[in-house]
């Protein structure tokens, strides 16, 4: 472990030096990439430094116990050593977690898709509630949140909505939200006071970079049409909405949120690239023989992952059997406890996989 930590510290210093070079500063793409690596390595280097400080303390306490003639001093050193050894063990465990190979997509921005499932109008309203929850969670994380395209429900909410989210560690935190979310509550339209169950699915796609995915532009058909919805007369008079079809896979992406055809095309290409990247990742995973499917981070939208029970103010994550009774805070964007628990579960899985490998 120590050798690995020394290697990472060496790399940290190399990246630190590269960040100040003129050729890095002038290349925004390279600068962003190195800056993300620098921040990620910084967490490990800081923990490693603290561990080394603790080890020095352990050695000093042992030396006092072995050489000091004053019995009182030796007793103080023994108590100090006892506390330091506990701290050393805790720091070693923390370093082991930090050294677990990360999902290479964790640092990426994401495309978030929310679709109303079973439950009619109530499902669309619930999809809107999930959108608000992720908007507020993004605010708390200081992420940039933008709507790409949407299809509104007849009684509020959304039949489908697609958003892009940019910032630090976005996919690493949001990937656990992929799957089917259920809501149990009395809809506003219910006159008998009966609790209904509705659902919405969430997909979280890591945003693909140009270097990771080659797309033949000849494989893409571009259609334009008049946008509908908010935006005034300008929206409806010009063909600003864009539909892109990737002919080899049949993937279709639409965008009508931007004011211009050019802006909608750029947004649609971003979503299309991420969808094709997701297909590539699935293909690679299927090709890895005997790969065990992760319980917490598989990203399959068909998995039932969480239930929001309004009468009991209860939220349950079914993957880790974790339940809280602060539903109002959760739907107001306070997802941190769920993210932390799911990350711990994912790390435990990866450690077991590493030990078995």
Image (cartoon, grey):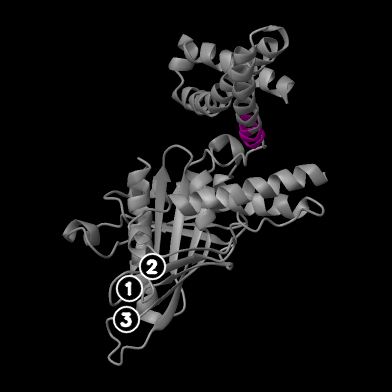
Is residue 310 visible in the rendered image? The answer is: yes
**Label 1 crowd (10 A; few <14 / some 14-19 / many >=20):** some
Is 210 displayed left or right of 71 in the figure?
left
Q: How many marks?
A: 3
In the image, 22 versus 197, the foreground residue is: 197
**Label 2 crowd (10 A; few <14 / some 14-19 / many >=20):** many
Q: Can you name the residue that lies furthest to the bottom here?
A: 192
**Real-space Cα distance between discs 3 and 2?**
14 Å
* Residue 75 on image: x %, y %: 62, 19
Q: Residue at x 34, y 53 (%)?
A: 135
Q: Pointers 2 and 1 in contact (CB under 8 A)?
A: yes
Above or below, comparing residue 98 to residue 310 in the picture:
above
Q: Which residue position holds label 2?
A: 127
Circle 3 or circle 2, nearest the eye: 3
- Per the rendered image, the range of residues in magenta is 90-98
Is 132 displayed left or right of 206 in the figure?
left
Q: Can you name the residue that lies furthest to the front here?
A: 71
Above or below, comparing residue 82 to residue 330 in the picture:
above
Q: Of label 2 and label 1, which has the lower sequence position?
A: 2
- Residue 20 painted magenta: no
Q: Of label 1 and label 3, which has the lower sequence position?
A: 1
Circle 1 or circle 3, nearest the eye: 3
Q: Which residue position holds label 3?
A: 187
In the image, 310 versus 7, the foreground residue is: 310
């Amino acid at each position: 472990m120590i050798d690995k930590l020394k290697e990472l510290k060496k790399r940290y210093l190399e990246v630190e030096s590269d960040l100040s070079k003129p050729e890095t500063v002038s290349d925004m793409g390279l600068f962003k990439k190195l800056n993300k690596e620098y921040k990620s390595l910084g967490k490990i280097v800081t923990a490693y430094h603290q561990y080394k400080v603790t080890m020095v303390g352990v050695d000093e306490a042992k030396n006092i116990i072995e050489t000091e003639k004053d019995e009182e001093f030796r007793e103080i050193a023994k108590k100090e050593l006892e506390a330091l050894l506990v701290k050393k063990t805790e720091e070693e465990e923390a370093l082991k977690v930090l050294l677990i190979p990360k999902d290479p997509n964790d640092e990426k921005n994401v495309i978030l898709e929310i679709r109303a499932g079973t439950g009619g109008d109530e499902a669309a309203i619930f999809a809107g509630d999930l959108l608000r929850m992720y908007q507020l969670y993004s605010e708390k994380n200081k992420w940039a949140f933008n709507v790409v395209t949407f299809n509104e429900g007849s009684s509020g909410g959304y039949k489908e909505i697609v958003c892009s989210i940019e910032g630090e560690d976005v996919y690493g935190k949001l990937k656990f939200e992929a799957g089917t979310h259920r809501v149990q509550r009395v809809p506003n339209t219910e006159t008998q006071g009966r609790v209904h169950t509705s659902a919405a699915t969430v997909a979280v796609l890591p945003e693909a970079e140009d270097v990771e995915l080659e797309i033949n532009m000849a494989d893409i058909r571009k259609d334009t049409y008049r946008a509908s919805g908010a935006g005034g007369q300008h929206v409806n008079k010009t063909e600003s909405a864009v539909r892109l079809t990737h002919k080899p896979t049949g993937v279709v992406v639409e965008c009508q949120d931007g004011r211009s055809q050019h802006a909608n095309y750029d947004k649609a290409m971003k979503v299309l690239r991420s969808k094709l990247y997701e297909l590539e990742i699935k293909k690679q995973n299927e090709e890895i023989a005997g790969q065990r499917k992760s319980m917490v981070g598989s990203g399959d939208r068909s998995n039932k992952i969480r239930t929001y029970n309004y009468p009991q103010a209860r939220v349950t994550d079914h993957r880790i059997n974790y339940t809280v009774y602060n539903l109002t805070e959760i739907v107001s964007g306070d997802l941190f406890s769920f993210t932390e628990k799911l990350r711990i579960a994912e790390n435990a899985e990866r450690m077991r996989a590493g030990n078995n490998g």
